[in-house]
Image (cartoon, rainbow, N blue to C red):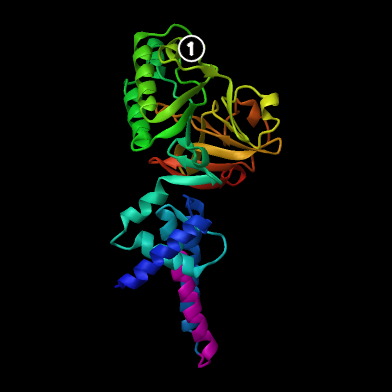
Amino acid sequence: MLDEKRIKEAELNTKQYLQEGLIKRQKNDTAKIMYIQNSDLSLQTAQKLLSLETKEYLPYLWVIVTSYYSMYYISNAVLLNLGYKIGDKISHKVTSDALIVFARNKLNKKFLEEYEDSLEIIKDIEIIDLSLFLKKHNTLILSDLHIGYEESLNDKGVLVPRVQFKQMYARLKTILEGNKFKEVIITGDLKHEFGIINDTEWKNTLRLIDLILEHCEKLILIKGNHDITLKYIANKRSIELVEYVKIDDILICHGDNILKEAMKDSKIIIIGHEHPAVGLREKNKYESYKCFLKGKYERKTLIVIPSFNTLTTGTDVLRRRLLSPYLQQDLDNFEVYAIEDKKPYEMGKIKNLK
C-alpha cells in the first residue's frame, strides 16, 4: 500500500508533467496495442533468460531489466486506456507518478478536474468541450449551433426527435455557469434555416442569446452563410452582426470566405463552418468524434472549431472533401483534438490517423 507522502509527491509531480506537456490527454488504441505487445514480448524474453542453464550474473540481470520493461509497457497501456499518454521519450518516473495519480483505487477526483475538462491547443488558447477559450482576453468562442435544424429535417419528412436544442442549451449552460466572460463570440450559423424564421426558431434563438448574455459583458455574432435572416432576431437584443472580429493578432471569422485584408497582420485565424469530425475504425467498429483542427494557412496558425450542434457529428476530415477555402490544402500535418464525453483528447496528426 502506498504511503501518503509518496502519493502527495506523485500528485505534485504529475501536476507539473501536465503543465509541461510530458503527460497529455490522448486516446490512441494503436499505441495501446503496441504497449501490450511490447509488454508480452519483454515478459517472454525474461522467461527465456531465466530458463538458460548458466551460472553467469548477466542473464539474471537481464531478467530483472526485461521484467521491469514489461511492467513499464503495460503501465503505459493502462494510462492510455484511461485517456493519458506519456511523452515519446521513455520516462519511467513520469509513468510511475502518473500511474499512482490516475490508476490507484482512491483516485483524487478534485485533482483531476482541473485538467480533464480543458486542454491548451496553443499558448493561452484552451479547448473547453466544444468551445474555445482565449484566456488572456477572457473570451469564449462557439461555432455553428444551427438552431432549428431538427425542425428543418422534420419539415422534409425526416423523423428525428426534437431534443437537440434542449441538449445544446444544457451543454452550453454547463460551460457558462460560474463564469463572467468579457466577450462570447459565435463564429456564424447560429440558426439553420436560410429563409422564413418560424416560431420555434424565434423562441429558441432568443432563449439561447439570453442565456449567453447572463454570463458575458458582450455577445458578438459573426455572420455565417446560414445567417441571412438572423439580423431580425439579433435586433431584438440590439446585437450587431459582423463579418469578422480582430483581437490583437487573432482573426475570428466564419470560414466560408478568405478575408485577405483582415488576415494581413494576423498570426492566428480561428474559423468554424467546416463542422470537423474524425472517424476512427478498428476492425468492424467505426466511431466518429467532433474535433478541433490545428494547422497552418499561409504561415499563420489556423484553428478550426467543431459545430456546437448536437444532432450530427460533422464532416469526417479523414474521408470527406472539405468545404472551407482555408482547408483546400494538404491537411496531413494538421493536428486533431477529439472531443469525447465533453473532454478533449490529442489524437496526433491527420496523416497518422488515416
Above or below, 18 against 169 in this view is below
State the residue in front, 213 or 253: 213
Above or below, 18 against 93 in this view is above
Quarter of the image where the N terminus is located: bottom left
Above or below, 194 against 315 in this view is above
Q: Which residue is mark 1?
A: 231
State the residue in front, 174 or 49: 174
Q: Position of residue 335 (x, y in %)?
A: 58, 43
Question: Is residue 48 visible in this depiction of the protein?
Answer: no
Q: Position of residue 262 (x, y in %)?
A: 66, 26
Circle 1 crowding by C-alpha within 10 Å: few under 14, some 14–19, many from 20? some
Above or below, 203 against 344 in this view is above
Amino acid carrying mark 1 in the image: Lys
Quarter of image, res 259? top right
Q: Which residues are magenta?
A: 54-73
* Rendered residue at 37%/53% (across/down): 112
Give the farthest residue toward the bottom: 55
Q: Secondary structure at mark 1?
A: helix
State the residue in front, 90 or 29: 90
Quarter of image, res 225? top right
- Magenta region, main secondary structure: helix
Quarter of the image where the C terminus is located: top right
Magenta span includes 345 = no
Question: Is residue 282 visible in this depiction of the protein?
Answer: yes
Q: Position of residue 49 (x, y in %)?
A: 50, 81
Q: How many marks?
A: 1
* Rendered residue at 50%/78% (across/down): 65
Quarter of image, res 173? top left
State the residue in front, 282 or 289: 289
Q: Position of residue 268 (x, y in %)?
A: 62, 37
